[in-house]
Image (tube, rainbow, N blue to C red):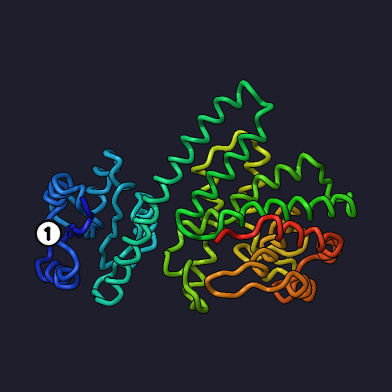
Amino acid sequence: MKRDTILIFEDNSIERAMLVEMFKDNYSILEAENGKDGIELLNSHFSSIAIVLLDYLMPVMDGFQVLERLKEKKLLSKIPFIMITGEDSSDLEKKGYEYGIVSYIKKPYQPDVVKQVVSNAIGWFEYKMKLEIVVKRQNDSIQKQNDILKQKTKELNQLNGILIDSLSGIVEFRNLESRQHIKRIRQFSICLGKSIMKLYSEYELTSDKLMQIGWACALHDIGKITIPDHIITKPGKLTVDEFELMKSHTTKGAEIIQKSIRLNDKAVFDYACDIARHHHEKYDGKGYPDGLKGEQISIAAQIVSLADIYDTLTTERVYKTDYEPDKAHQMIMNGRYGSFSPKMLQAFEEVASEFEEILKKYPDED
């Protein structure tokens, strides 16, 4: 059943009517004058409810009493809740977020703001639910492989290969990148890592570590699955707000890996979390999300960052055409796409021709 209903908990008939007026053209509306009646409506119409607007102060049961009751039934993770309040209290807001509400609406109402908050919450929650379904499918598949791995450790590489194919499926599910993108990033990262290992022993890289980085980097953009389609596929320049949302794929990606993806190899897991969060950090400290600078950025994240930029430059995207490998190499060396350490650039210089060969070996499929 399609979720096309808004449930409004609001004892003030005038304010409730204002909310109904805002949403009646696009949603079915359910109205409750108190917390007890609202819970009954929620239980009887659960499958059709897209979002709940919950007033803080109500008779019979107030907003937090409602949340406490629903928390016991574990319903707060299945529908987005927005709390309505006329108070301006950080303690109140903190308490609401601890229960699991997704946002607040302040009185008196500003219709445009209220509509946008509700729209954002519904959109975010829809993507969250889709992500949970996709990740569950992948986890089921990976768990089966992990059961085999406990008895046959020699099949680790085969398992990692299955993982990459599964992740390619997630990526293709949202049309984020081509299937070949993940393969190229892995090969670029291993190639660049070998150059680093040869030139700079202080990073203590080994062949085993490079293989782990190679597998882990397949997850570097998993957070993009939480970004709305209209931003992911936008052919033009992103707005400031859109770019801020796009940047969040780094933190969301790390969170997804930490909470939702089971990897039997702890080293690969640790690399994957680090790479997902920090592959957009820059050596001069002007990257995101944490503004790390210099060697605060792990060598794994530095390697994957350069590999990702090279792949972005040399392949066609919805917002750009591709550059020739020589041009891409020059742009990276000149700092056109952010700063890298002198050591990283020297290592990249050593394997520029090998990067071109990898690009030819794994072209995007039509």
**Which residue occupies 46% across, 69% down?**
231
Residue extending farthest to the top is 151
Return the residue nearer the eye: 43 or 167.
Answer: 167
Q: Mark 1 points at which residue?
A: 31
Q: What residue type is labelled 1?
A: Glu
**Which residue occupies 47% across, 73% down?**
234
- Dividing the picture into quadrants, the one containing residue 319 is bottom right
- Dividing the picture into quadrants, the one containing residue 294 is bottom right
- Dividing the picture into quadrants, the one containing residue 110 is bottom left
Q: Where is residue 156 in the image (x, y as percent from the top left)?
A: 66, 32
Name above or below for residue 264 compared with residue 354.
Answer: above
Return the residue nearer the eye: 166 or 200.
Answer: 166
204 on left or right of 279:
right
Crowding at dot 1, Cα within 10 Å, few <14 / some 14-19 / many 20+, comes out as many
**Which residue occupies 65% across, 46% down?**
216
355 on left or right of 167:
right
